[in-house]
Image (tube, rainbow, N blue to C red):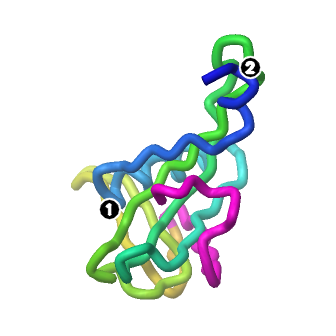
Amino acid sequence: MADEQVGEKLIPVKVGSLRDLARIAASIVTLGQPAYLVRFPGKDGGKVYGIIAVLRDYYKLYGLPMLYYYVDSGNELGDGSYLLVKLDDQGEHIEVSHATRPGWVAIPIINLAEKPSFFPEEV
């Protein structure tokens, strides 16, 4: 694939868990950049959670657009509006919630009616 073609598409990266996706989003937010997750119906009836990020200065390109995503195939995460992340002396805490909480990093979840057309087919 030529460099020009690579830069024109989102590169899908499926993460192993919602915790992994939460760490990516929280690291973006704590560095002062705005971030949000999108949620849309998946192919097999589950829900896809994703975040678009740019892998900066990828070889000769200005950046490589990445779609990090997680599939909740059993719809176990519910329909909350925020992904909450907190680190303390007892470890890492991650949950989907309908409201924010003091002391937690709150990442908004935006519901999409369907998968955007510019997302890769395999997502």
Prevailing SS of the magenta stretch:
loop
Residue 72, disc: none
- The stretch of residues the image draws in magenta is 103-123
The kind of secondary structure element at disc 2 is loop
Q: Nearer the viewer, residue 24 or 58?
A: 58
Work out which quarter of the rendered image holds the N terminus and state it. top right
**In 3D space, how far apart are the residues under numbered discs 2 and 1 (Cα atoms)?**
36 Å
Residue drawn at x 62%, y 50% is: 52
Amino acid type, residue under disc 2 in the picture: Leu
| Magenta-span inclusion, residue 77 | no
Residue 39 at x, y = what percent? Answer: 54, 73
Q: Nearer the viewer, residue 56 or 117?
A: 117
Would you call the spot at circle 1 few (<14 residues within 10 Å), some (14-19), or many (20 or more)?
A: few
Could you say which is closer to the camera, residue 74 or residue 35? Answer: 74
Query: Which residue does the numbered mark 1 point to in the structure image?
Result: 93
Q: Quadrant of residue 22?
A: bottom left
Above-or-below relation of 113 to 93: below
Residue placed furthest toward the left: 90
Residue appearing at x 59%, y 68% in the figure: 38
- Residue name at image x 26 percent, y 50 percent: 89
Q: Is residue 12 left or right of residue 62?
A: left
Within the image, what quadrant is residue 47 found in? Answer: bottom left
Residue 72 shown left or right of residue 7 in the figure: left
Q: Which residue is mark 2?
A: 61
Question: Which amino acid, mark 1?
Answer: His
Q: How many marks?
A: 2
Residue 122 in percent (x, y) is at: 46, 56
Residue 71 place in picture, x, y as percent: 37, 66
Residue 57, picture quadrant = top right
